[in-house]
Image (cartoon, helix red, strand yellow):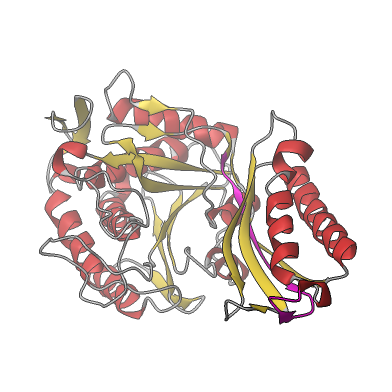
Amino acid sequence: MHSNKLMSFATTTSPIHTNFQIRANIFDLQPSLVQWRRDFHRFPELGFQEKRTSTAIAEKLTAWGIPHQTAIAQTGIVATITGKKAGQGQGKHKVLAIRADMDALPIQEENIVSYKSQIENMMHACGHDGHTAIALGTTKYLWEHREDFSGTVKIIFQPAEEGPGGAKPMIEAGVLENPRVDALIGLHLWNNLPLGTVGVRSGALMAATEYFHCKIIGRGGHGALPHQTIDSILVTAQIVNSIHSIVSRNVSPLESAVISIGEFHAGSAVNVIPDSARISGTVRYFNPEVGIKLASRMEEVIAGICAAHGANYDLQYHKLYPAVINDYAIAELVRSVAETVIETPAGIVPECQTMGGEDVSFFLEAVPGCYFFLGSANPDKGLAYPHHHPRFNFDETALATGVEIFVRCVEKFLN
């Protein structure tokens, strides 16, 4: 067994000069972390289809002798590790959960790397392969150093974050019970921040995610005789313009929200006014009261414009994920730990909100917790493409850093 002596290593290829304080036996895990990450990257799997990924995880946990459950919410896994350090006082031992997502995206990879995706039209374009590797490394380290902490750690390997969402069915399957989880932490490798930074804040971090499909039903006819029709394209175009004004004129400037139309489908011939048109889009916000207002106002706008033109509509509105809201105390725990790992004046970034969504929000609704961003971009290495881009990739130096932060959070929370 290696010494727990801290090692300081520096990187000067990142946008900022960074010193990482990584203990020796976590630093020694780095080659394995890279190997695991690249293996997952070569063989990406979509949500609830992560059979190879979950099998690989389970095989490692079995080989290491770590207790775990498989096939939770189809492909999810939970490893449970109980510390051997004597607990403080006579109270209940605490339980901390660590969550990592496993799924990939339906994107054709354009990177030219030895570990390029071997599956057509599928790739890890959001960093979940790295999340899984970090969670595996954390699990292995904690199992081998159970004498360093009291209480219990649950490591949750979750399917289907990209949709339709695996967090909720895992919670419904009881992953937060037996023993009951007191708090939960998770991270997202984040190419919107440079290597050597951690984005952590209390309160709202990521937005609620909702989407809608709307069919506008008019009356079709000849393009030369528009007076005989109810022009579904004209009606829908006015709806699109009006929907985009909802946020600017119905939501306080001190709040954050966005509505975006991503699809507009209508017609099949240049001289025919179609019977119907369809639009689809997404709605994002932090404040639940704002979300209620946006949904109701959208239907009012659509109904009013349709009524003015004699058209009808069919609106399907779906709530996907609530906002990611970090608990103050757990966010402070993560921040204080991150400051000891990343010794850079600008290393902690509190203003790191994004309108992107994440279903870790369901876990944070159930228990106090903190989801944080681990900076992973390195433009000097060409590793700065945004998430969900076909050339997305990240600086793998962040992997051992993620393990170190997780391990220190465990030690500080449970001890």
Across and down, in percent, residue 388 comes to 37, 57
Using the rendered view, name the quadrant where residue 34 is placed.
bottom left
The residue range painted magenta reads 205-225
Residue 215 occupies quadrant: bottom right
| Nearer to us in this view, 128 or 264 | 264
- Judging depth in this view, the residue of 87 and 56 nearest the camera is 56
- Residue sitting at the far top: 345
Q: Which residue ends up furthest to the front in the rendered image?
A: 224
Residue 81 at x, y percent in the picture: 39, 58
Which quadrant is the C terminus positioned in?
top left
**In this rendering, would 356 be left or right of 343?**
right
Above or below — where is 377 with respect to 214? above
Tally of numbered tags = 0
Magenta part mainly helix, strand or loop?
strand
Residue drawn at 51 percent across, 32 percent down: 201
Which one is nearer the viewer's eye here, 257 or 56?
257
Q: Quadrant of residue 382?
A: top left
Considering only vertical position in the picture, is 239 above or below 324? below
* Horizontal and vertical percent position of residue 251: 75, 37
The residue at 47%/28% (across/down) is: 350
Residue 222 belongs to magenta span: yes
Q: Residue 297: horizontal and vertical position, in percent? A: 81, 51
Residue 42 sits inside the magenta stretch: no
Please state which of residues 205 and 334 is positioned toward the viewer in this rendering: 205
Is residue 370 something one can see in this rendering? yes
Can residue 64 be seen by looking at this rendering?
A: no
Query: Left or right of 298: which side holds 6?
Result: left
